[in-house]
Image (tube, grey):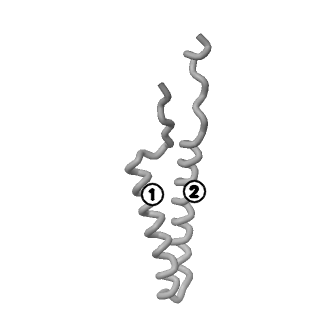
Amino acid sequence: MQQRVTGFLTPRQRRLAWLGFLLAAIHAPVSASLATDASWLFAVVVAMLVATVIIADDAERRRPQPATDELQG
């Protein structure tokens, strides 16, 4: 029986990460159009950080499972 490989984020954390990414990605252009300074760059940095965590979790989930001792017998 093969177990499903999971990443380091739980499904709930993964959904919250996607929500945070979408909110930050929407916030950046809106605040850029309203603000006269460069404070909107913070939203871009946060969105990039959250996206990096999501990508790392995807890579962990797609990593092949190591061989088990059952096959060696």
Residue 66 lies, in percent from the top left, at 60, 28
Find residue 64 and report its image quarter: top right
* Closer-to-camera residue (43/37): 43
Residue at 54% of width from left, 42% of height from top?
Answer: 61
Q: Which residue is mark 2?
A: 52
Is residue 66 placed above or below 31 in the rendered structure? Answer: above
Q: Which residue is mark 1?
A: 17
Q: Earlier in the sequence, mark 2 or mark 1?
A: 1
> SS of the residue at dot 1?
helix
Residue at 40% of width from left, 47% of height from top?
Answer: 11
Look at the image and tell me in which quarter the C terminus lies. top right
Residue 52 lies, in percent from the top left, at 57, 56
**Would you call the spot at circle 2 few (<14 residues within 10 Å), some (14-19), or many (20 or more)?**
few
Amino acid type shown at disc 1: Ala
* Closer-to-camera residue (10/4): 4
Amino acid type shown at disc 2: Thr
Residue at 42% of width from left, 45% of height from top?
Answer: 10
